[in-house]
Amino acid sequence: MNHLKPLLRVTILLILCTPFVSALGQDVRYDIRFPDLPGYKMYACDLHMHTVFSDGTVWPTVRVEEAWRQGLDVISITDHVEYHPHKDDLPINHGRPYDLAVGTAQAVDLLLIRGTEITRDTPPGHFNAIFLDDINKLDTPEFLDAIKAANAQGAFVWWNHQAWQGEDKGKWLDLYTTMYDNKLFQGMEVCNGSSYYPTAHKWCLEKNLTMLGNTDIHDPDLRKQSLPGDHRTMTLVFAKERTPAALKEALLAGRTAVWYKDQLIGRKEILEPLFDAALRIQAPIVRSGKNVYLRIANSCDTDIKLTRSGGNGPASIAIPAQATKVVEMTTAAADTPLDLQYTATNFLIAPDTGLPVVLKVPQE
Ligand SMILES: [Zn+2]
Ligand SMILES: [Zn+2]
């Protein structure tokens, strides 16, 4: 190998010495782009997924490779504690998926969080717990004992896909009140895969639970990139830094938004500054008589869809992801500042409720 140039030699040595990242050699990563919020950075997270160690069909390292390629920052592999259809082929070992995947995660600088899914018939249904030290302690006969064991380890716990199945789907039962009153879960999946649960969305707002969106993927995810029209359901978490402690603090504080299809779903306190950071009216503003030409830029990875709620401006404006749109409008007095009142219909602050926004057009 001595005749090779030094840089090439180092590259070959790295490849030879790190077989666990070799599958990534053909891949490139495309970042997911949403703005940071004042004081907090945006981290794209998928905190619910499965591997062959429960009922999934991929090896744990593949979950890391997919997520890295698609621009995610943080994932948790959450195989079922109780459901093991591959147990004749693989021994049950609750800690094994994390242990197998963490080396690949470290090699590509993706944060992998140890987690699991506590899986019971509905009710109570399925709950995820992350930031665990020892998943084995959650393997208990009684459901509430498993939930308590997760909380005893300082886990963040949430109710998955609450309207999924069972006669009591969509109902808030006494059991959930007991769990809620004892702070045994702190969030809910508002979205899971291709499903949106308006009831969960409503409950998160009423009960101050954190909103999450995850894939719950079982099969390989073959997407090369997260695109506005084709991306995994995920949670944008706004945290001080990308560490387990900072992410847990952000999740407990409810600083999340769910990116689901062409929508962002979250609290008004989160979506409002996110919108303000994503949308820019660019200078200079061109005026010609009573005509005003606005160039509106969208710096986030989802389209922004606006419907007029006030008296000025076009009836609707759509600004594609990562693009700039020219909007022409006529005004009564061309040289005065304008407040254009709209609703961002795909920024959901409650079921069927878009975010009210004001586009401020300064006088020039
Ligand atoms: Zn589940
Ligand atoms: Zn699941």
Image (cartoon, rainbow, N blue to C red):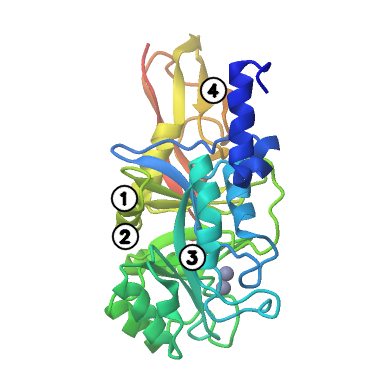
Q: Are marks 4 and 3 in contact (CB under 8 Å)?
A: no
Is the residue marked 2 within 8 Å of ligand 2, measured from its CB?
A: no
Q: Residues within 10 Å of mark 2 (few under 14, many from 20)?
A: some
Amino acid type of the residue tagged 2 in the rendering: Leu
Identify the residue under disc 2. 252
Towards the viewer: 191 or 170: 191
Location of mark 1 (residue): 246
Q: Amino acid at mark 4?
A: Met
Q: Earlier in the sequence, mark 4 or mark 3?
A: 3
> Mark 4 CB in 8 Å range of ligand 2?
no
Quadrant the C terminus occupies: top left
* Dot in front, 4 or 3: 3
Residue at 44 percent across and 47 percent down: it is: 355
Nearer mark to the viewer, of 1 and 4: 1
The residue furthest front is 2
Q: Residues within 10 Å of mark 4 (few under 14, many from 20)?
A: some
Given the image, on which type of amino acid does mark 3 rest?
Glu
Tell me where residue 117 appears, x and y as whole percent. 50, 72
